Amino acid sequence: VPGVAQLIEPEQQSNNFGKEAGGEDDLWIIMQRASTHSLKTFMDQKREKYKADIEVSSAIKFVQHLIGIVKQVHSRGILHQNIEPENIVIEYESKNPSINEANLTLLNFTQAYIKSHQSIHINQENATRWYQPPEANSQSFKYSATNDASAIVAILLWLLTDAIPQHREKILPHLKPEVHDKLDRKFSNVANIANGNQLKTYLIDTFNRAFGFPEYEPWTIDDLECRIKCISQLFTPSDSNLNTIGDIFRSLIPLTTSSKLISTSDHPAAIQKAANAFTQVKQELLNSNPDQYSWFDGNCTWLNTAQHPMNEYRHDDILTYYWRNQSYSIIIICLASINDEGRVITLSIGSTVHGKMIRIPLGQYSI
């Protein structure tokens, strides 16, 4: 797997594979030599030597890369179970590199769980981990791929705040005052996206689901990948100079000429029609309740959900509603899928409530 330290086969046949861990025999393996810079060392140098902190966009891109490596490991039937900054090696060439310029390698599979060998080894039972997801204490999630996803989100929080998530108190790690203040400063310093509040809503919801078990269902690696991709799209420059909700929707109302929504060269024409339909419904909601609701459309970017059994596309948006002089925001997901024959499109909307997706079907339409 690219991005994973490789095992080197010895010249002579090793008898390690016939012995059990925890016995009197000394077991050994030969691994590819790794660079001397772990992610922890890399970040310590940036924070201490260069007095520099990581940008939110850089942290998101790094996590995207890490998710890609972990997904490949999972595809081999292996769960890492110990993802932490010391187990990620960073290689770079420049003297003061950005984390975006670094290559990363995942190390230390001593606590890994191999699905084809489901016996529990001593190194798994007595392991001390940098981050212990709350769901790992539940028998049903003890050897689950969600533990790796939660650890990745823990690394994201650590990159942004230099705080290791802990669950010793009743408050969630990212909501502790000192950590929350650091996140707020990060969000306020983001100058290259239209609305920092949207970034904050996405990230806080991501942390809620990663750290909030059992109230929240833990992230699967596929769902986390899709969420991080949605966040990364917020940093993609828009071709438009639209700044307000009204400006955005006025540009989308001419449904027959709308080209900013999605490119028909990239997506099927049926998805373009579905996108136009969702846009019209959103506008109707605003027109009927102009003082109660507002949307923030994240550059109108539709994503293809590759892991879904159908050819499904999704668009995440934030609906803000106003009640009793306060505002509340929720993430609304618009979904459109085409059947294998390409003749029927299914539309639905959904939202995540306590980590569980609630999906409402809107109907099926012939193409």
Image (cartoon, rainbow, N blue to C red):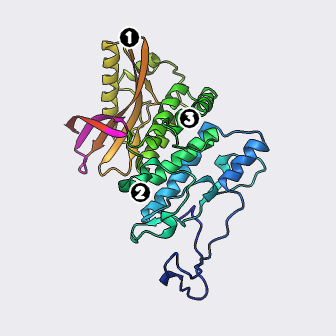
For marks 3 and 2, give the one nearer the viewer: 2
The mark total stands at 3
Q: Position of residue 14 (x, y in %)?
A: 56, 85
Q: Earlier in the sequence, mark 1 or mark 2?
A: 2
User: The C terminus appears in which quarter of the rendering?
Assistant: top left
The amino acid beneath tag 2 is: Lys
Mark 2 sits on what residue? Answer: 142
Horizontally, residue 102 falls left or right of residue 84, namely: right
Secondary element type, mark 3: loop
Write down the region rendered in magenta.
Answer: 339-357
Residue at horizontal 43%, vertical 31%?
Answer: 300
Horizontally, residue 49 falls left or right of residue 365, namely: right
Vertical position of residue 253 compared to residue 340: above or below: above
Vertical position of residue 328 compared to residue 48: above or below: above
Residue at horizontal 47%, vertical 50%?
Answer: 149
The amino acid beneath tag 3 is: Phe
Q: Nearer the viewer, residue 297 or 72?
A: 72
Residue at horizontal 57%, vertical 47%?
Answer: 155
Mark 3 sits on what residue? Answer: 235
Q: Which mark is residue 291?
A: 1
User: Is residue 33 visible to us here?
Assistant: yes
The amino acid beneath tag 1 is: Asp
Horizontally, residue 185 falls left or right of residue 312, namely: right
